[in-house]
Image (tube, helix red, strand yellow):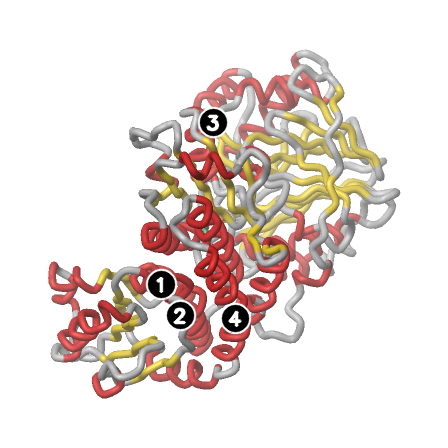
Amino acid sequence: MCGIVGFTGREQAAPILLECLKKLEYRGYDSAGIAVRDSSLPVVIEKTTGKLKALSDRTHGGKALKGMSGIGHTRWATHGAPSVQNAHPHVSGGVRSTVTGVHNGIIENYAELKQKLTDNGYEFYSETDTEVLIKLVDYYYRKYRIGPIDAINRTMVRVKGSYAVALMFDDYPEEIYAARNDSPLVIGTTQDSSFLASDVSAILSRTRSFYYLGNLQAARLKKGKVEFFNLNGDRISIRKKTVDWETDSAEKHGYEHFMLKEIHEQPDVIRRMLDRYIEDEGICICDDQLDESFFQDLKQIIIVACGSAWHAGVAAQYMTEAVTDVPVRVELASEFRYRSMYACKECLFIVISQSGETADSLAALRKAKSLGIRTLAIVNVNGSSIANEADHVILTLAGPEISVATTKAYSAQLIALYLLVIQMAFIRGNLDAVMYSQMIGELKELPDKISSILSDKEKYQRLATVFSSRQDMFFIGRNMDYAICLEGSLKMKEISYIHSEAYAAGELKHGTISLIEDGTVVVGVITCPHIADKTLSNMIECKSRGARLITVTDLEDKGIESVCDYMIKIPSVNGLFMASLAVVPLQLLSYYTSLSRGLDVDKPRNLAKSVTVE
Ligand code: G6P
């Protein structure tokens, strides 16, 4: 999704803006641009399509542009094709261009506003909703002869949709203005500089002190100073937050790609989670309000998320139903937000999100709150919209995740869910003290077991070379193995562009098996002993139709080896936690397949790390 940055301070802005935009590259983009301003001179704008490098080359790393304040943007096209014309920054134009801006989000009523502005003499040069937004600010600014904050506020009242916007007004050199509704925006300061960005990682190397602008709030950034305003134009205060992520955790550290680095970070992330949330051999994951009596009375859980976070939710559903008597529904956030469903009062709504900014997940959370359901967010980014709005929060402590394809954040989500479910089962009497301690002990073994899988990466490199030319892949499994397949298949398709589907193995015969032909790759995940034979016989059915079989298993003596072309053996663990182990070979397989196909592993085409629009 689009990324925005802004800077005002005592250094040249353009190189800083390019540096910050580089850190937002992972969000996905197809064009980029910056605008800088030297106090006495007009704004200078440079835009290019394609990679940031083109923008950097064109401006000699930004050195060709003079000015100590500026804004920048990476654009992921929504309204209008990727082109220089549509790239941001956009300007109000006209006789005297007063406003220059960048925007992340979608203005839903842009067509109606464009008409209004056209009727008032404005002309448009791009197909973007952003140009409409900028011109609307300009319209109010000129018409009422008001200050930037009042013009922004009038605009916010008028537009519908989501936006994080950074603006420069010609009449206010050295100042940057910002406003937001539902799209992420963070503001950071140092003694003599102020920054803004779509997320913390973009400016983490510059400051650790951040302000999270709330919805329908605006900010004025001066050098080292920032003021906040509500929709009435009144000054408000926002609490400063300090982020404890390592500055260099958003660097590659010798790994060829962020994805590989993040895969290798998984043991440490899990250790960090267990250290934080297990005290004196007991799980401390709940707060004062999410207490024993709440869990005792709980009648239903609804888990809502998107993408891999939804897959973590599916794993949690199998687990919860295996160890507790609480029914669980898992819904895609994009579906949940528009469907009617009954939820009882003693229900817990769990939203899972790495970024904490996914538009559908945020909307689903708000819907649950409006229904009066207690909400819990399992989220990686502290201070994000979802973390701020949920009643309760469990932070996943994965640190910044840069690769678009999630790995360590998914693993951390699983751990948060295991801890929650174990604690709930214990409180409800579904687990006795011995089983409780045993499970905690088994969780603590996960990091070393994952490390042992990671140490055998040559195997995945070889396998990837064999299969990277294939067109289709199917991932099949039952029960928890099916939840694992969902994630394995998504990893494969999103970064290798090989068509891939996950199927509950028992469903194959209801259609999918007709797609199996000579050479089709079928990956079977077989770790649930009680149904291993069934999945295996589904794999044999595929083999008889020409499929090449890869199996991920921890089981011995099931006759798997003699059936499969390639077997990936993983360590055993309590089956409830198997997703944490079995997903790792699938992550590596996807990574090396993408690599051997020569693709951009960390930034797959058309995808965005953080999907902040609907
Ligand atoms: C995007 C990412 C996925 C992620 C999903 C949900 O599609 O590429 O990796 O699982 O969004 O994101 P969230 O930040 O809510 O976990």
Q: Is tag 3's residue or tag 4's residue first in the polypeptide sequence?
A: 3
Determine which residue is flagged by label 1. 484
**Lateral position of residue 386 relative to residue 217, left or right:** left
Residue at 75%, 30% in the rendered image: 220
150 in relation to 452, above or below: above
Q: Which mark is residue 537?
A: none
- At label 4, counting other C-alpha atoms closer than 10 Å, the crowd grade (few under 14, some 14-19, many 20 or more) is some
Tag 3 residue = 110
- Tell me if residue 176 can be seen: yes
Mark 1 vs mark 3: give the one in front: 1
State which tag comes first along the sequence, 2 or 3. Answer: 3
Q: Is residue 58 above or below residue 43?
A: below
Amino acid carrying label 2: it is Ala
Residue positioned 44% across, 82% down in the render: 461
From the top left corner, tell me how far across and down residue 579 is, in percent: 40, 64
Camera-nearest label, 4 or 2 = 4
| Residue carrying label 2 | 582
**Mark with earlier residue (2, 1):** 1
